[in-house]
Amino acid sequence: MLASLLIAAVSGMRAMTPLATVANAARRGELPRDGGAPALLAHPLVSAGTLALAAGELAGDKMKTAPDRIILPGMVARVTTGAFAAASLAPREQRTLAAVLGAGVAAGASYLTFHARKAAMRRYGQTGTGAVEDAIALGTAALAVRAAR
């Protein structure tokens, strides 16, 4: 369940990174066979599409016009991808629990990281703090997939 909670926490920082990470791991055959990841995630087009969306999100986050992550559409995306990615990394018999916990962790992490980033931005600016947050999100997502194996 640790892998599911980690990937859900990443959703609080970046909504598309968990989905792209899980899809790419599924495409490479790196997820456990008894896991909850749908076969559709392993399709090369799905993998490429989620990767493109995640890359766009990483770039867009550094723009001055980027909306706050805690607005309703952002929260819906984070909770949804957090629940889906968490369920995808969980063993089949724990998918429902992982999805519910993943949704909660994603929501909590959204608020926690929003306030942490706002505080850091006052001192270090938007681009620098965004790059650090990207590194944390990508590293944690990779760790979650590794923990799921």
Image (spheres, grey):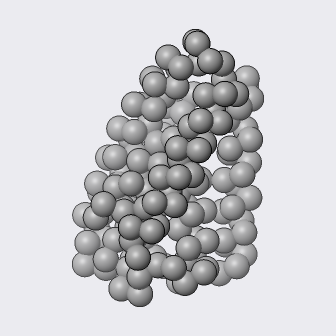
Residue toward you, 72 or 53: 53
Is 119 located above or below residue 93 in the figure?
Answer: above
Asked whether residue 31 appears in the rendered view, the answer is yes
Residue toward you, 70 or 114: 114
Quarter of the image that includes the C terminus: bottom left
Quarter of the image that includes the N terminus: bottom left
User: Could you tell me which residue is drawn at 34 percent across and 71 percent down?
Assistant: 90
Is 66 located above or below residue 147 in the figure?
Answer: above
Is 44 located above or below residue 61 in the figure?
Answer: below
User: Could you tell me which residue is drawn at 34 percent across and 55 percent down?
Assistant: 5
At which x and y percent is residue 45? 72, 75
Residue toward you, 32 or 86: 32
> Is residue 107 rendered to the left or right of residue 100?
right
> Is residue 81 rendered to the left or right of residue 92?
right
Residue toward you, 86 or 130: 130
Asked whether residue 79 appears in the rendered view, the answer is no
